[in-house]
Image (cartoon, rainbow, N blue to C red):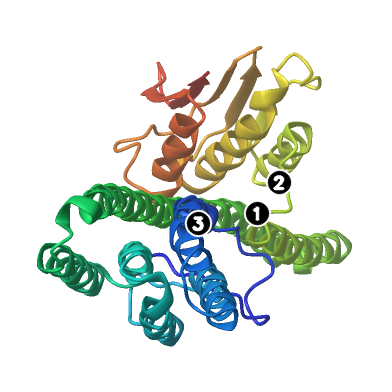
Amino acid sequence: MRTSNSSPTANPESQPDPWERTSLLLGGIWIIFLAFPIITAWTSEAALWARVATIACLVVFAIVYMWGYLDTSWTHVARRPVAVIVVLAVLAAISYPVAGLNGPLTCLIFIMSYSIWAFPYRVSMGIATAALAVMLLVVFTSGETAQWWFLAALAVILGIGLTVARTAAESGERHQETEKQLVMAQERERVGRDVHDLLGHTLTAITVKAELAEKLVDADPARARAELAEIQALSREAITEVRHTVGSLRARRLDSEIAGATAALNDAGITVAAPEDVTIVEPRLRMLFAWVVREATTNVLRHSGAENCWIEIGTSRLSIADDGRGATSPFAGNGLRGLRERVEEAGGTLLVSTREPGGTIVEVTA
């Protein structure tokens, strides 16, 4: 729910509260009505010092009233609104000897309107109802109902209008909070997919190279050392990429993903046919296709047992096929399931099918 805080310790990066400006407008637009008790006070037969003091009192009333809107809360009873209500009530009473009923009755309208906007809903309605009841009681017991009925009518209309505005504002606040929670959930899912895709691919490549180095350590020590050096490089790259992903600072490059996938597949003994030029792909799809290449080739390395892999690209199409054992349940794992969500969020379609005479085809169209 909404709160407004002018404390210097507030987060400077937080978004401005649009309802703060709205509440100031809704509250300030009625200030003109204080002209009536001010005119009444000035034209009264009281001593000059009393008239000046009453007008000063009403000016202070207006200042305190507007100041109160700078710190209101819809979740709890804050100290400032309580103090503002007390001060406004005292100033309204002080205006009575010179301004007559015009002073406190007009001030009660402001007290009612401020209370509607300054407290949790039940407290607001309680104070506003009490203020309106006091006003109506004074009007109908003063013997001057014909003179003051318009103020009572104005109070009722204003109270209804502000209550509707308050209800709409609270509804908007709840909607915004729901949207924020949804965005945060989507962002957590996105980061989870990114980390999974990054680590899944890199750790698979490291595993393949480690197995190769183990086989070569006696037969070809120099080649084994080279594979170990590449493992170190991949580990450092993985650390860097995870940091960039968490910080949302990194965008994948399609050409580097295809090159990296080709190298990893070749190291695993899988022959790869891949395009060298990726400029035919629409720029808006290159990052998406880079993720598809990474996840799909990771699955080829892990599960396919393939000897060959084909990567084909078009303007808005990507296909990765292999001649392995085929996918029995294509979306069972987190990788392809997360990838499908990513593709659908981008407005594309991910299709995983069986290749004849054997193998799997992963195809994305957007």
Kind of residue at badge 2: Asp
Few, some or many C-alpha atoms within 10 Å of disc 1 (few <14, some 14-19, many ≥20)? many
- What is the distance, in whole Å, between disc 3 and disc 2 at their CAs? 86 Å
Earlier residue among tags 1 and 3: 3
For the residue marked with disc 1, what is the amino acid? Ala
Q: Is residue 1 above or below residue 350?
A: below
Q: Say what secondary structure mark 1 lies in.
A: helix
CA separation in Å, label 1 and label 2 = 9 Å
Residue 112 lies in quadrant: bottom left
Q: Is residue 33 left or right of residue 248?
A: left
In percent of width and height, residue 166 lies at 32, 54
Q: Tag 2's secondary structure?
A: helix
How many C-alpha atoms fall within 10 Å of the one at disc 2: few (<14), some, or many (≥20)? some
Looking at the image, the residue that sits furthest to the right is 222
Q: Nearer the viewer, mark 1 or mark 2?
A: 1
Which label is found at residue 205?
Answer: 1
How dense is the environment of label 3, judged by Cα within 10 Å: few (below 14), some, or many (20 and up)? some
- The number of callouts visible is 3
- Between disc 3 and disc 2, the foreground one is 3
- Amino acid type at circle 3 is Ala
Q: Earlier in the sequence, mark 1 or mark 2?
A: 1
Residues marked 1 and 3 touching at CB (< 8 Å): no
Q: Residue at 41% of width from left, 20% of height from top?
A: 355
Tell me where residue 149 appears, x and y as whole percent.
Answer: 20, 52
Q: Which residue is mark 3?
A: 35
Label located before the other in sequence (3 or 2): 3
Q: Quadrant of the N terminus?
A: bottom left
Cα distance, mark 1 to mark 3? 79 Å
Q: Read off the residue under disc 2.
A: 267
Would residue 196 be seen by someone viewing this image from the given angle?
no
